[in-house]
Image (cartoon, helix red, strand yellow):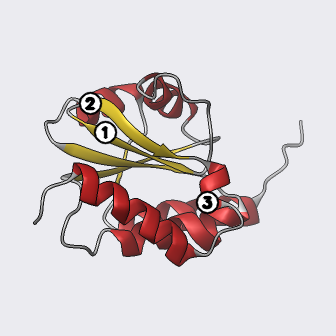
Amino acid sequence: MFQFQFPLYNDIVEQARREAVEAGFEELRTPEDVDAAFRRPGTTLVLINSVCGCAGGIARPAAAHAVHYDKRPDHLVTVFAGQDKEATARAREYFVGEPPSSPSFALLKDGKLCAMLHRHDIEGHEPVAVVQKLQALFDEYCEEV
């Protein structure tokens, strides 16, 4: 049976993963990875990554720049919506009361949700505006480094 290959799409996914990792985010690819990461004490910024244009043009660049700040989360992690489905589903279990959204950001403290930036907080905004939103959350919930 003939099977379609989508090398361009695979390249886009790999580039999206690489951009997050190069920005300092740890990839969580399984539910067990998520549980282990979210059990760590302190603050954790979760990037819910995706391949859409607002992820590549706004969310990932904002994530990369926002963490260069006096206050920042103790841990930076990412799950990939639509790719690592089980890990993303597990992460969303921690975001109690929040609808699924990607790309998006969640800020946790000791495994508990403090705040979220949803797709509507990202899409249509300039990356610098998203950086400012993230850094405002860092000011509120994170310690100075």
Secondary element type, mark 2: loop
Residue at image mark 3: 122
Mark 3 closeness class: few <14, some 14–19, many ≥20 residues within 10 Å: many
Q: Are marks 1 and 3 in contact (CB under 8 Å)?
A: no
Secondary element type, mark 1: strand
- Choose between 144 and 13: the one closer to the eye: 144
Residue 90 % position (x, y): 45, 25
User: At 59% from the left edge and 42% from the top edge, which residue is drawn?
Assistant: 81
The Cα–Cα distance between marks 2 and 3, rounded to whole angstroms, is 23 Å
Q: Is residue 98 left or right of residue 123?
A: left
Residue 50 % position (x, y): 62, 53
Residue 47 % position (x, y): 45, 51
Residue at image mark 1: 108
User: At 53% from the left edge and 72% from the top edge, which residue is drawn?
Assistant: 129
The circle on residue 41 is none
Type of residue at label 2?
Gly
Q: Sequence-wise, which precedes: disc 2 or disc 3?
A: 2
User: At 23% from the left edge and 61% from the top edge, which residue is drawn?
Assistant: 72
User: At 60% from the left edge and 55% from the top edge, which residue is drawn?
Assistant: 121
Type of residue at label 1?
Leu
- Choose between 142 and 92: the one closer to the eye: 142
- Choose between 83 and 140: the one closer to the eye: 140
Secondary element type, mark 3: helix
Residue at image mark 2: 111
Mark 2 closeness class: few <14, some 14–19, many ≥20 residues within 10 Å: some
Mark 1 closeness class: few <14, some 14–19, many ≥20 residues within 10 Å: many
2 or 3: mark nearer the eye: 3
